[in-house]
C-alpha cells in the first residue's frame, strides 16, 4: 500500500467512525509520513501534507505549519487543504496559524490558488475583526484576481454571520 492509498483508507475510516482502526493505520504510517514531509521531492511533500488531513491527524499540526512555509505551491496548497479539513470541527487549528494565513492572503504568496485556499481555511476559524477587515479589503481590491475577490467576500460574510450568531 502506498501513502496515497493509506490516506484514502484513513479518510474512509474517519468518515465511518472506526477510531481504533484509524489509530492503528496512523501508527503504521507515522514514520513514512514524516519522511515524505521532509522529502526533497515537492510531490512527496504535497502528498504527505494532504495525508495529514485525510488521516485526521491533529498531532501533526506542527508539521502542517511547516507545510504552510514550504517553497512549493503544491505543498503549501496541500497543507492548506488539510488545515481546512482539520479545522471544520476545531477552529483552534486555524486560529493557531491565523497570522501566517493573514500573510498568505495579504499578497505575500505569489500563487493565487494558494491565496484562495488560505482564504477558504480562514472561514473555519473564529470571526476575528482583523480577519474580516482583511478579507473585505481583498474583496474590493481591483488588483486581485476575480476568484480571489469572490472567495474573500464570501468568507468575510460567513465570518460576520458567525459573529452575529454568537451574540
Image (cartoon, rainbow, N blue to C red):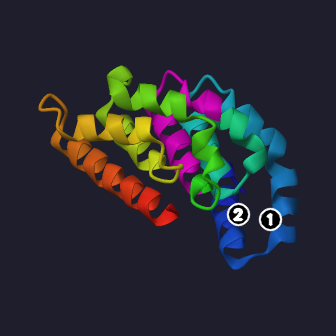
Q: Secondary structure at mark 2?
A: helix
For the question of whether residue 110 can be seen, the reply is no
Q: Horizontal and vertical percent for residue 58?
A: 74, 49
Crowding at mark 1 (Cα within 10 Å: few <14, some 14-19, many 20+): many
Q: Which residues are magenta?
A: 65-85
Residue extending farthest to the left is 142
Crowding at mark 2 (Cα within 10 Å: few <14, some 14-19, many 20+): many
Residue 116 vs residue 43: left or right? left
Name the residue tied to disc 2.
10
Residue 54 belongs to magenta span: no
For the question of whether residue 40 can be seen, the reply is yes
Q: CA distance from mark 2 to mark 1?
A: 6 Å
Vertical placement of residue 69 versus 53, above or below? above
Q: Secondary structure at mark 1?
A: helix
Vertical placement of residue 81 versus 16, above or below? above
Please give the name of the residue rendered at 57% of the width and 46% of the height, measured from the top-left corner. 83
Please give the name of the residue rendered at 54% of the width and 35% of the height, measured from the top-left corner. 98
Name the residue tied to disc 1.
22
Q: Are marks 2 and 1 in contact (CB under 8 Å)?
A: yes
Residue 82 vs residue 165: left or right? right
Return the residue nearer the eye: 166 or 69. Answer: 166
Which of marks 1 and 2 precedes in the sequence?
Answer: 2
Vertical placement of residue 124 versus 140, above or below? below
Task: Name the image quarter holding the N terminus.
Answer: bottom right
Q: Quadrant of residue 47?
A: top right
Residue 84 vs residue 28: left or right? left
Q: Main secondary structure of the magenta part?
A: helix
Q: Horizontal and vertical percent for residue 50?
A: 58, 47
Q: Horizontal and vertical percent for residue 63?
A: 70, 34
Q: Horizontal and vertical percent for residue 100?
A: 52, 28
Please give the name of the residue rendered at 65% of the width and 65% of the height, measured from the top-left corner. 11
Amino acid at each position: 500500500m502506498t501513502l496515497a492509498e493509506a490516506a484514502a483508507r484513513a479518510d474512509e475510516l474517519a468518515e465511518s467512525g472506526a477510531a481504533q482502526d484509524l489509530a492503528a493505520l496512523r501508527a503504521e504510517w507515522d514514520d513514512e509520513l514524516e519522511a515524505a514531509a521532509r522529502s526533497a521531492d515537492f510531490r512527496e511533500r504535497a502528498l504527505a501534507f494532504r495525508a495529514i488531513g485525510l488521516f485526521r491527524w491533529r498531532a501533526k499540526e506542527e508539521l502542517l505549519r511547516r507545510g504552510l512555509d514550504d517553497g512549493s505551491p503544491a505543498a503549501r496548497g496541500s497543507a492548506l487543504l488539510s488545515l481546512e479539513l482539520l479545522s471544520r470541527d476545531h477552529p483552534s487549528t486555524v486560529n493557531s496559524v491565523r497570522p501566517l494565513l493573514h500573510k498568505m492572503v495579504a499578497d505575500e504568496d505569489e500563487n493565487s490558488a494558494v491565496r484562495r485556499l488560505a482564504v477558504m481555511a480562514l472561514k473555519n476559524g473564529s470571526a476575528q475583526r482583523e480577519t474580516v477587515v482583511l478579507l473585505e479589503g481583498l474583496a474590493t481590491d481591483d488588483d486581485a484576481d476575480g476568484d480571489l475577490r469572490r472567495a474573500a467576500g464570501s468568507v468575510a460574510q460567513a465570518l460576520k454571520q458567525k459573529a452575529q450568531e454568537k451574540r
